[in-house]
């Protein structure tokens, strides 16, 4: 197995630090499409950003939920919306790589969009309850090889496939259980319905409290709350489980609109005085900005990596 995407884990920034926010303004009310169900952490960050955009720039922002299929429903709809800056959407980066090609008939491609910026990443780790007694994934592998059936919670097709490949690389077979997002993983762990699972940062509070433990980091770098946890890439999995919250617009958005909207969002999520930045710090470990050419490159490499993962799983 080999990965076609190697990331350093550093924050890539293509910034407009030498230019002020342009005089551009949306031609009317701006619709912010949100690919996440109402009330969750992803929805909350979206609405806090929308509120701050209105407060800072006087733009009228209309949040609109458009959920389903890992962001694919939103993407398929947004590609045909006006590209004058009046419509933007927030999804996860998997929407434009893994989820896109895993669908048998994808209704969109990366070329249908202008990518603006990420806001934050996922602190994706393999989590277990502390009372299981496991410290690292090596303990889990040993338990599995001793005959214990390990139920592995996964929140998306990509995380399910990575769980399978992690087991395969270590000669164990997990019983992979689909969960409804990170909250579903936490609920499953607490109820005893699963033994381990992918957490995307929602586990941080429980880890800090000592109730749960990150057994491994699925990122290219250590987890912020568990820097000593081994990396899954060092456990035979050459693919990463990282992902990002991502703003995009229909392809062809004017440069002035793209730069103004991008800069406005970045300024909000990196300003520690805003509710949006404070929420990102609490829920997702803070802001993580990738934009411009770096973002286009990241998504292209992620698409190549997704193709390789799907090939590995099918063999």
Image (tube, rainbow, N blue to C red):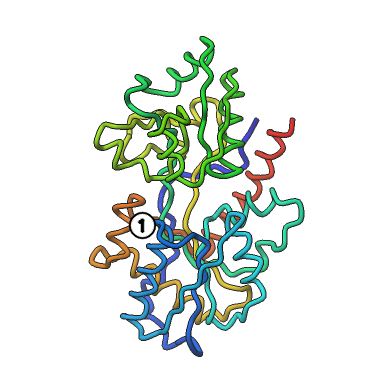
Above or below: residue 270 compared with residue 198: below
Q: Please provide percent x and percent y for residue 309.
A: 65, 39
Q: Quadrant of residue 76?
A: bottom right
Crowding around mark 1 (Cα neighbors within 10 Å: few <14, some 14 to 19, many 20+) is many
Q: Please provide percent x and percent y for residue 26.
A: 48, 86
SS at badge 1: loop
Q: Nearer the viewer, residue 31 or 311?
A: 31
Name the residue located 32 percent from the left edge and 80 percent from the top edge: 56
Q: Residue furthest top?
A: 146
Q: How many marks?
A: 1
Q: Quadrant of residue 15?
A: bottom left
Name the residue located 60 percent from the left edge and 17 percent from the top edge: 171
Above or below: residue 245 compared with residue 200: below
Q: Quadrant of residue 110?
A: bottom right
Report the residue marked by disc 1: 287
Name the residue located 50 percent from the left edge and 66 percent from the top edge: 34
Q: Nearer the viewer, residue 287 or 6?
A: 287
Position of residue 231 in the picture relative to residue 224 (left or right): right
Q: Please provide percent x and percent y for residue 207.
A: 30, 36
**The N terminus lies in which quarter of the figure?**
top right
Q: Nearer the viewer, residue 88 or 206?
A: 206
């Amino acid at each position: 197995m080999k990965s076609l995407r190697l990331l350093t884990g550093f924050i890539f920034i293509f910034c407009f630090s030498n230019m002020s926010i342009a005089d551009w303004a949306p031609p009317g009310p701006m619709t912010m499409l949100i690919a996440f169900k109402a009330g969750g952490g992803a929805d909350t960050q979206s609405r806090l950003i929308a509120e701050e955009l209105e407060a800072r720039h006087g733009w009228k922002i209309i949040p609109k939920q458009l959920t389903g299929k890992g962001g694919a429903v939103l993407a398929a709809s947004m590609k045909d919306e006006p590209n004058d800056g009046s419509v933007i959407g927030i999804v996860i980066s998997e929407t434009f790589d893994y989820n896109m090609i895993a669908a048998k008939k994808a209704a969109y491609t990366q070329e249908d969009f202008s990518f603006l910026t990420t806001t934050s990443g996922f602190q994706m780790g393999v989590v277990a309850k502390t009372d299981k007694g496991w410290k690292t994934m090596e303990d889990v592998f040993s338990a599995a090889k001793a005959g214990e059936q390990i139920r592995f919670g996964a929140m998306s097709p990509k995380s399910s496939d990575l769980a399978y490949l992690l087991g395969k690389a270590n000669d164990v077979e997990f019983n992979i259980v689909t969960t409804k997002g990170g909250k579903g993983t936490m609920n499953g762990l607490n109820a005893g319905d699963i033994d381990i699972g992918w957490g995307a940062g929602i586990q941080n509070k429980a880890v800090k409290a000592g109730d749960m433990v990150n057994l491994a980091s699925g990122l290219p770098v250590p987890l912020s709350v568990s820097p000593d946890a081994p990396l899954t890439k060092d456990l035979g999995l050459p693919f990463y489980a990282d992902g990002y919250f991502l703003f995009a617009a229909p392809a062809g958005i004017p440069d002035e609109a793209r730069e103004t909207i991008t800069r406005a969002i970045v300024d909000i999520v990196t300003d520690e005085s805003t509710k949006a930045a404070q929420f990102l710090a609490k829920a997702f470990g803070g802001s993580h900005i990738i934009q411009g050419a770096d973002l286009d490159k990241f998504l292209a490499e992620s698409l190549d990596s997704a193709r390789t993962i799907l090939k590995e799983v099918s063999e």
